[in-house]
Image: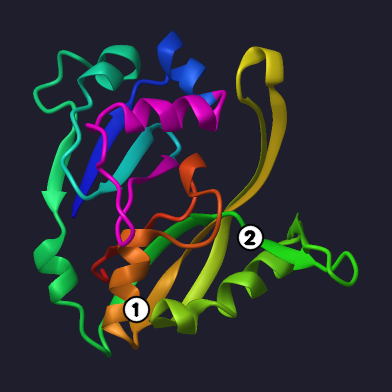
Amino acid sequence: MYLTRMHLNSARRGTRHLLASPQRMHAAVLSAFPPGSEHETARVLWRLDRGVDKLTLYISSPRKPDLTHVVEQAGWPTAPDPWSSASLDHFLTGLQPGQAWRFRLTANPVHSVRQGDGLRGKRLAHVTASQQEEWFRTRCERWGFATRHVAITDRRVVTFGRGAPSQRRKVTLSMATYDGVLQVQDSASLSTALTAGLGRAKGYGCGLLTLAPLL
């Protein structure tokens, strides 16, 4: 597994074009890999972190990406290192119960509402901060960790078109970004969460959990 980081140039028209639709960003990310790069236990995940004065694209993937086309469209082509990739294999095998890490996750918190006997439940977004935080806390154990601290640092609703122009439908996603400190409980479950992603809407910038050492 690899974790890749690329800074986006917010002044470029191509960047604004990608930011306007998670569908476009997803297509740009996937085009950095040959066919067959995803499989059952690991997939291509991405997340866009919006800082005060910078935009950073993170990608987790079974293979190293070639982001030349994204750099030409939305990055800094003349920079000495327009993107960087690091192997996660040693990090994943080194996860142990009791370790503490800073974390960040952008997710799509949803719940299923029953529609009646024999009918499939309808998925609805959690819309309040308290609902979104509860959604996260109730799932930590299955993901292999406990939270020492968690805060929602960004909340947004994104609407975009999906599909061919003749069959385009509107997609609306409620997204929340969680920052905090976690403690490893089950290293195998956490490793799966890191490589397979968390929650829904993984193709649209949700589900990528990243860890960093405590300061």
Residue 189 marker: 1
From this viewpoint, which residue is outermost toward the front?
Answer: 118
- Residue farthest toward the top in the current orientation of the protein: 13
- Which x, y percent locates residue 62? 21, 50
Q: Residue at x 34, y 32 (%)?
A: 30
Query: How crowded is the residue under tag 1: few (<14 C-alpha within 10 Å), some, or many (20+)?
Result: some
The colour scheme is: rainbow
Q: For numbered disc 1, what is the local secondary structure?
A: helix
- Numbered badge on residue 109: 2
Q: Name the kind of residue labelled 1 in the image.
A: Ser
Task: Please identify the quadrant where the N terminus is shown.
Answer: bottom left
Query: The C terminus lies in which quarter of the figure?
Result: bottom left
Q: Which badge, 2 or 1, comes first in the chain's sequence?
A: 2
Residue 148 is at least partly visible in this image: no
Q: Which residues are magenta?
A: 20-49
Considering depth in this image, is 101 or 198 the residue closer to the camera? 198
Q: Nearer the viewer, mark 2 or mark 1?
A: 1
User: Does residue 83 appear anywhere in the picture?
Assistant: yes
Outermost residue, right direction?
A: 116
Any magenta on residue 208?
A: no
Q: Quadrant of residue 182?
A: bottom left
